[in-house]
Image (cartoon, rainbow, N blue to C red):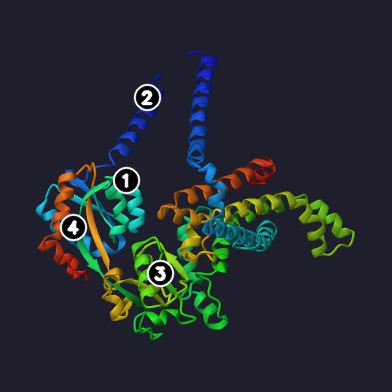
Amino acid sequence: MTRRRPTAAALAAAIGVVGACGGAGTGGRAALDVFAAASLTEALTALAPSFEAVHPGVEVRFTFGSSSALARQVADGAPADVLATADEATMAPLIADGRVHDPAIVARNRLTIAVAPGNPLGVAGLADLARPGLTVVLCAPEAPCGRLARAALGAAGITVRPASSEENVKAVLSRVTLGEADAGVVYVTDVRAVGGRAEAVAIDAGVAADPAVQAVYPMAEVAGADQATAARAFVAFSRSAAGQRSFGAAGFLPP
Amino acid sequence: MSHPERRRRASRLALVAGALAASFLALPLVGLLWRTPWSGLGHSLGQPGVAGALRLSLVTSLSATAVAVALGVPLAWVLARADLPGRRVIRALALVPLVLPPVVGGVALLLALGRRGLVGQWLDQWLGIRLPFTTAGAVVAQAFVALPFVVLPAEGAFGSADRRFEDAARTLGAGGWTVFRRVTLPLAWPALAAGAVLAWARALGEFGATITFAGSAPGRTTTVPVEVYLGLESGRFEDAVVLSLVLVAVSVTVLLVRRDSWLGPLRA
């Protein structure tokens, strides 16, 4: 009979490990799980330490991805405390279902065309994206960046056949920085985030000014969050002057 | 505790563990069937994205199988018969796609055959060939991951075939190519067919390397697994489940029909 015990102990240990994955952060701090649009990566990563400085018991953990994917995960019960998407349309069904509540706009963003450093192909605006032989990559139409890019192209009266529709905006930028694509429509902040590895070509001023092609970032608490208090504090902090400094430094427009 | 009693207990334990393993394998499939929108099956299959992905996957997976067979069978023959110095290294290389995460395979392909890749930049400059974002690129990604499934059984068959038949043919005056075509190939045929079918099933299910290397464009690189992923991401849940069902049906059919003749050579 003694033989069975190690197995049982191992099983119990395994269950314990799996069970411990939610909630607890490192060093005894409570983990605040923030699910956020890929384009928020740099701004929120920069913001987290200043938030943790004023909330010493909390450790912020991020999951960055496409807004539509994150929204689906939250709808399916993923252990998130805060959700931030790159448009209001993606969050709307979650608000209607009561999966998230108290959304607040934390930032805005503009589209731009990312090209190789030095703009070797001389891309000058949206119209050039229809140029034959130019390999253009957009976000998938389901992702906010894809929807906005298509709205911008539509507003400019341009038809583009993308070589690939990527799942999120960072993937589009990777295609450009790797040299696989000649141009990609991304956010201003994304090009800034990769330093000199890509260059931004401004999209046509008339189109850029259209609020319908600007990204709006709502952030909301997830219903039944493990860290409800910290979640509320995180949303408030993102809107505070200190939080907005991080967004501004990354190139976002104020809400 | 007496020996027979201990043996009985051991077999009971094995039975419980086996049942647990079997349900662990079966449960996800049952879950899929449970959520399959049976009444909307026809409608989903008729959606342009779904139908297009099925058509594209059929074309790319068959092409990838052809490429894998064309490259894999000669390689298997060399590994089994030729006395090469670096044979062990080549054999290990041939199996790399089997253990490599497909997405890593995709990144590696991109760095090798992409527009700025090691070889890809010359393909682009000299021949004007660009593989990323093309159907040919999807075929390359699938052939890469499918290749070991051809090489492994074929090498086993070439290695274990009775050489006396070949020797006999040679003494009767047959040339090298005739011997291979008329004797070696027919002897290895079951293993080659098994390898080709498994390679096809693997190519059909390829996701990570394809989306990484070839991207996603409907009708050109959005294969069935990629469409399943995009369907889930974008709330077209039903389409994703229906396409998943098609892939499951194909896999189970491949394994069920003459399972032993498919998998037998892999054990050799």
Q: Horizontally, is B98 left or right of A139 in the view?
A: right
Query: Is label 4 in a helix, a strand or a loop?
Result: helix
Residue A245, horizontal then vertical, whole percent: 14, 66
Q: Are discs 3 and 1 both within one chain?
A: yes
Residue A138, label in figure: 3
Residue B129, horizontal then vertical, whole percent: 56, 77
Query: Is label 2 in a helix, a strand or a loop?
Result: helix
Three-letter code for the amino acid on which mark 4 is drawn: Ala
Q: Chain of mark 1?
A: A
In percent of the image, x 80 and y 60: which residue is there?
Answer: B181
Quadrant location of the N terminus of chain A?
top left
Decide: few, some or many residues near mark 1? Use Cα within 10 Å; few <14, some 14-19, many ≥20. Answer: some
Decide: few, some or many residues near mark 3? Use Cα within 10 Å; few <14, some 14-19, many ≥20. Answer: many
Query: Badge 1 is on which residue?
Result: A78
- Depth check: A57 or B176 in front? A57
Image marks 4 and 1: residues in contact by CB distance under 8 Å: no
Q: Horizontally, is B164 left or right of B83 in the view?
A: right
Indicate the quadrant where residue B85 lies: bottom right
Q: Is the residue B145 above or below the residue A148 in the image?
A: above
Give the alpha-carbon distance from disc 4 to disc 2, as whole Å.
44 Å
In front of the other: label 4 or label 2? 4
Residue A25, horizontal then vertical, whole percent: 22, 46
Quadrant location of the C terminus of chain A?
bottom left
Of callouts 4 and 1, the N-terminal one: 4
Q: Chain of mark 3?
A: A
Three-letter code for the amino acid on which mark 3 is drawn: Leu
In percent of the image, x 52 and y 48: which residue is there?
Answer: B242
In front of the other: label 1 or label 2? 1
Indicate the quadrant where residue A182 lies: bottom left
Query: Badge 2 is on which residue?
Result: A5
Of callouts 3 and 4, the N-terminal one: 4
Of callouts 3 and 1, the N-terminal one: 1
